[in-house]
Image (cartoon, grey):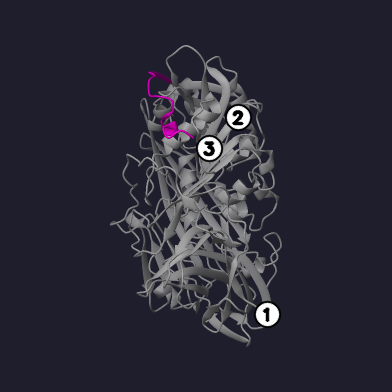
């Protein structure tokens, strides 16, 4: 491609017009609200859709993203899912089949507008990335290109509710689950929907349901989770796909899986980013991602010959060992290019005493570690309360550790490391948590990646099966995907126990996990070795923005240890919530949080407060939720929910 091809793109030349009064009819009979920003110019333009419940453009304003694309010749639609923003209907769960069909109908409507060229792109991060993939799997003809970031293809295993058959701890209860209850209580814009806004809002309050109720009532991978999951259906996607992921995000695995499964034109871009746009991520280097996306849209929606498909299909940031400062905003490593993801045989390291070796152990052995729910507290958090993983020596002190000799050469990996262990336990429910660590020449232990499996899900996520105390069984699972270069002179360590606090809710039984090795028990980890790719043929344009604030310096979290009771509490800033676990009795755990939303209408101020408490004993989970809404300072609406569900070996 020509050296200046990356300069070929739509220019910032248009004045724009913005309206939040668009009503998009869908086949169910309701209409969705949309705020559309488009050029003030004759002719037709491609449409870009961002489809989620976040109320963007609710008041008729164009945010920076909408302005960026509209001034460059695109009709940009902030489309609100049913029951949120300026849309009709009720919101009772995320990613319903009706919500997805609404998105398909909306694309058809947009493509048919006189100011639209008939070509539509869809993109976004997190929720809007999920809807992008779900709609694309139904292959609406007008949808020509997509660009989802931070998404999943399999909701049970790789969303924020369950992980490796373990209930999530921190994220659902202390962040997303309760906050969505408050967010969805906000009203539509009176300017957009007219005098009926308060009636529409009241019906929304009366018929809406907290999402978290559904998640807790489906503790195994049943048909509920298949709705909204595109795993097994990626070959139906016809739109060209640019997939964006982040190694420090909560969704590092799906971009690799979806990329491998797609048959449409595709690209893969994975940086060191957290759950924030690559131009604002706490973890840099931050890039001007909207310039990269603009070139993508220009090629597929405007037919520009800008060389975007001549560039490497896989563009990935390879990380490496550095001082593990949890507040750093630049991640050590560098960009690498490849034409495909690794396909070769993995490199195995076998457990042998306290060593990892490339040959199996010739003598049998075993070692045990006590299950302590808060034994590992330095694995990092993702989400609004984001922080990176810390130094791993403290966590490893309460784990079984297996370490190689110093490496004699650099070793690159790209993909999912896996583990296959022979284990036993003295209780029926036991998690197996594995941390892959690089131990530097100076002894600093840096987390490379981690994985966890509730061993009762060893035969799959649909059919939990209790452990038989004392019986040796095989468990196999993956760690989170990564790209990493181990440096010559470093050592590789597998650190194993049952804990990932506060990311995972404790399993209910106090006991011990034993690992077994030997000629008949070839316990090992496997690393997806990689040739390291090649140098990138270009440099990304740096982002003009600073790193997003993650609360560093104001305690992203604080862990308080009650020595007498041997309990650990994660305390959120400003008293907004906490999570408590017990080393003496893992069954007894709790979490509570409060979330708020506010909105201003002409002559009306709305405040919503949602509170939630999740607690557990040996048999059940109990969830209590409450929503209180005030209008102009006076109580307007109240509702409570209580649900008790069986633990199902969780």
Label 1 – label 3 distance at C-alpha: 52 Å
> Overall secondary structure of the magenta stretch?
loop
Instruction: Tell me the residue that label 2 is attached to.
Output: 143
Local crowd at mark 3 within 10 Å, few (<14), some, or many (≥20)?
Answer: few
Local crowd at mark 2 within 10 Å, few (<14), some, or many (≥20)?
Answer: many
Residue 2 included in the magenta stretch of the image? yes
* In this rendering, the label closer to the viewer, 3 or 2: 3
Instruction: Tell me the residue that label 1 is attached to.
Output: 472
* Residue 52 in sight: no
Mark nearer the N terminus (2 vs 1): 2
Residue 44 included in the magenta stretch of the image? no
Mark nearer the N terminus (3 vs 2): 2
Relative side of 313 to 101, left or right: left
Question: On the image, which quarter does residue 37 sit in?
Answer: top left
Local crowd at mark 1 within 10 Å, few (<14), some, or many (≥20)?
Answer: some
Q: Secondary structure at mark 2?
A: strand
Q: State the extent of the magenta-drawn residues as a range.
A: 1-18
* In this rendering, the label closer to the viewer, 1 or 3: 3
Asked whether the residues under the numbered discs 3 and 2 touch, taking CB atoms below 8 Å apart as contact, a structural biologist would say no
Residue 15 drawn at (x, y percent):
38, 18
Residue 352 drawn at (x, y percent):
57, 82
Q: Secondary structure at mark 3?
A: helix
The one nearer the camera, 414 or 472, is 414
Q: Which mark is residue 310?
A: 3
Q: Indicate whether 137 appears above or below 567.
A: above
The one nearer the camera, 355 or 40, is 355
* Residue 202 in sight: yes
Label 2 – label 1 distance at C-alpha: 51 Å
Q: Secondary structure at mark 1?
A: loop
């Amino acid at each position: 491609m020509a050296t200046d091809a990356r300069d070929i793109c739509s220019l910032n030349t248009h004045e724009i017009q913005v309206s939040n009064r668009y009503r998009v009819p869908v086949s169910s009979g309701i209409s969705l609200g949309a705020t559309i920003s488009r050029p003030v110019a004759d002719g037709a333009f491609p449409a870009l859709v961002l489809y989620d419940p976040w109320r963007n453009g609710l008041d008729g304003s164009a945010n920076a993203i909408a302005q960026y694309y509209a001034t460059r010749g695109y009709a940009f639609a902030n489309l609100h899912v049913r029951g949120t923003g300026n849309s009709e209907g009720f919101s009772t769960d995320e990613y319903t089949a009706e919500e997805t069909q609404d998105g398909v109908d909306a694309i058809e409507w947009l493509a048919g507008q006189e100011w639209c060229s008939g070509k539509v792109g869809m993109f976004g991060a997190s929720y809007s990335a999920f809807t992008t993939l779900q709609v694309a799997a139904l292959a609406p003809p007008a949808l020509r290109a997509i660009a989802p970031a931070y998404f999943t293809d399999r909701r049970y295993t790789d969303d924020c509710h369950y992980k490796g058959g373990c209930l999530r701890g921190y994220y659902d209860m202390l962040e997303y689950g309760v906050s969505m209850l408050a967010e969805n209580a906000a009203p539509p814009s009176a300017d957009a929907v007219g005098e009926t806004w308060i009636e529409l809002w009241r019906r929304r309050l009366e018929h809406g349901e907290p999402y978290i109720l559904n998640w807790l009532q489906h503790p195994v991978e049943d048909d509920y989770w298949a709705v909204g999951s595109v795993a097994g259906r990626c070959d139906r996607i016809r739109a060209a796909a640019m997939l964006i992921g982040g190694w420090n995000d909560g969704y590092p695995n799906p971009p690799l899986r979806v990329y491998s499964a797609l048959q449409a034109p595709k690209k893969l871009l994975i940086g060191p980013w957290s759950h924030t746009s690559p131009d604002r991520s706490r973890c840099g280097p931050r890039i001007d991602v909207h310039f990269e996306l603009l070139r993508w849209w220009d090629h597929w929606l405007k037919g520009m010959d800008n060389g975007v498909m001549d560039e490497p299909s896989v563009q990935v940031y390879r990380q490496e060992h550095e001082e593990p400062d949890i507040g750093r905003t630049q991640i050590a490593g560098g960009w690498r290019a490849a034409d495909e993801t690794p396909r070769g045989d993995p490199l195995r390291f076998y457990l042998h005493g306290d060593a990892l070796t490339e040959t199996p152990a010739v003598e049998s052995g075993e070692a045990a570690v006590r299950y302590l729910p808060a034994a590992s507290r330095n694995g990092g958090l993702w989400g609004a309360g984001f922080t990176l993983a810390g130094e791993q020596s403290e966590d490893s002190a309460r784990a079984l550790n297996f370490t190689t000799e110093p490496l004699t050469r650099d070793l690159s990996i790209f993909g999912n490391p896996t583990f296959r262990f022979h284990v036993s336990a003295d209780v029926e429910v036991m998690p197996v948590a594995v941390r892959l660590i690089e131990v530097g020449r100076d002894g600093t232990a840096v987390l490379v990646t981690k994985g966890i499996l509730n061993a009762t899900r060893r035969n799959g996520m649909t059919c939990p099966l209790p452990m038989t105390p004392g019986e040796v069984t095989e468990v196999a699972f993956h760690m989170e995907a990564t790209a990493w270069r181990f440096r010559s002179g470093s050592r590789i360590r597998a650190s194993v126990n049952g804990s990932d606090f506060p990311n995972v809710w404790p399993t209910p039984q106090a006991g011990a996990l034993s690992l077994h090795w030997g000629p008949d028990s070839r316990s090992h980890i496997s690393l997806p070795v990689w040739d390291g790719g090649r140098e990138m043929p270009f440099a990304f344009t740096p982002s003009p923005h600073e790193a997003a604030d993650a609360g560093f310096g104001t305690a992203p979290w604080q862990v308080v240890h009650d020595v007498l009771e041997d309990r650990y509490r994660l305390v959120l800033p400003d008293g907004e919530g906490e999570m408590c676990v017990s080393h003496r009795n893992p069954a007894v755990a709790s979490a509570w949080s409060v979330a708020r939303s506010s909105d201003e209408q002409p002559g009306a101020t709305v405040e919503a407060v949602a509170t939630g408490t999740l607690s557990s004993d040996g048999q059940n989970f109990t969830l209590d939720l409450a929503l209180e809404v005030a209008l102009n300072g006076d109580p307007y609406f109240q509702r409570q929910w209580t649900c008790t569900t069986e633990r199902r070996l969780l």
